[in-house]
Amino acid sequence: MVVSGLTIGYQPNNFTTIANNTVNYTFANSGTGTNDFAIFETHDPWGNTVVKTAITNAAHTFAVFTPTQLAGFNFNDYRVVVLNWDDHIPSEFDPPYAAAIPALQNYVNSGGVLWIQGSIQGFSYALPFGGTAAYHR
């Protein structure tokens, strides 16, 4: 599991290398799956596609889903699950995300790679395995 509060999705930060490295790291450490990356988000952070571009540049594929699709999702069909919460507020992805935490923990425990990209816009939210992500200025 990779959790990052770094604002990767904000293009002017020029964190392309970090995004590329995270894509390569998560994929290299994933198990087998029918598909490469599943991305959950409500919108492209700040209108930018940094994570998606890094996945494409690494010659991998991705499918995009909304947080409401977390319920009952077959995470095992994907090598890496990305919760792309950059530029989101928790109300955009919670409560579907909170309800899916047990399934996400099972996915990780069975060898799946979960990447939570969470430079959120204020507030805090629960992380799998008992953690908390919080906004700090």
Image: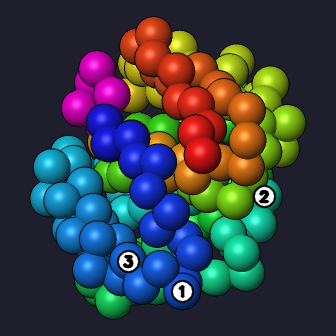
Residue picked out by circle 1: 12
Query: What amino acid does circle 3 point to?
Result: Phe
Which of marks 3 and 2 precedes in the sequence?
3
Distance, label 2 to label 1, CA atoms, is 21 Å
Report the residue that reaches farthest toward the right.
91
**Residue 107 x %, y %:** 39, 28
Considering depth in this image, is 60 or 35 the residue closer to the camera?
A: 60
Vertical order, 52 against 85 (above or below): below
Residue 52, label in figure: none
Q: Which residues are magenta?
A: 108-112
| Magenta span: chief secondary structure | loop
Q: Within 10 angstroms of label 3, few (less than 14), some, or many (20 or more) residues?
A: some
- Distance CA(mark 2)–CA(mark 3): 21 Å
Residue appearing at x 37%, y 63% in the figure: 36
Out of 25 and 71, give the one closest to the viewer.
25
Which numbered disc covers residue 42? 2
Provide residue 86's location: percent of width, then percent of height: 61, 57
Give residue 121's position: percent from left, percent from top: 73, 49
Left or right? Give the position of 58 relative to 86.
Answer: left
**At x 23% / y 32%, what residue is drawn?**
111
Residue 94 % position (x, y): 78, 30
Q: Which residue position is annotated with label 3? A: 15
What residue occupies the far top of the structure in this picture?
Answer: 130
Assign a secondary structure to mark 2. Answer: loop
Q: Is residue 136 left or right of residue 18?
A: right
Label 3 near label 2: C-beta < 8 Å? no
Which of the 4 quarters of the picture holds residue 70? top right
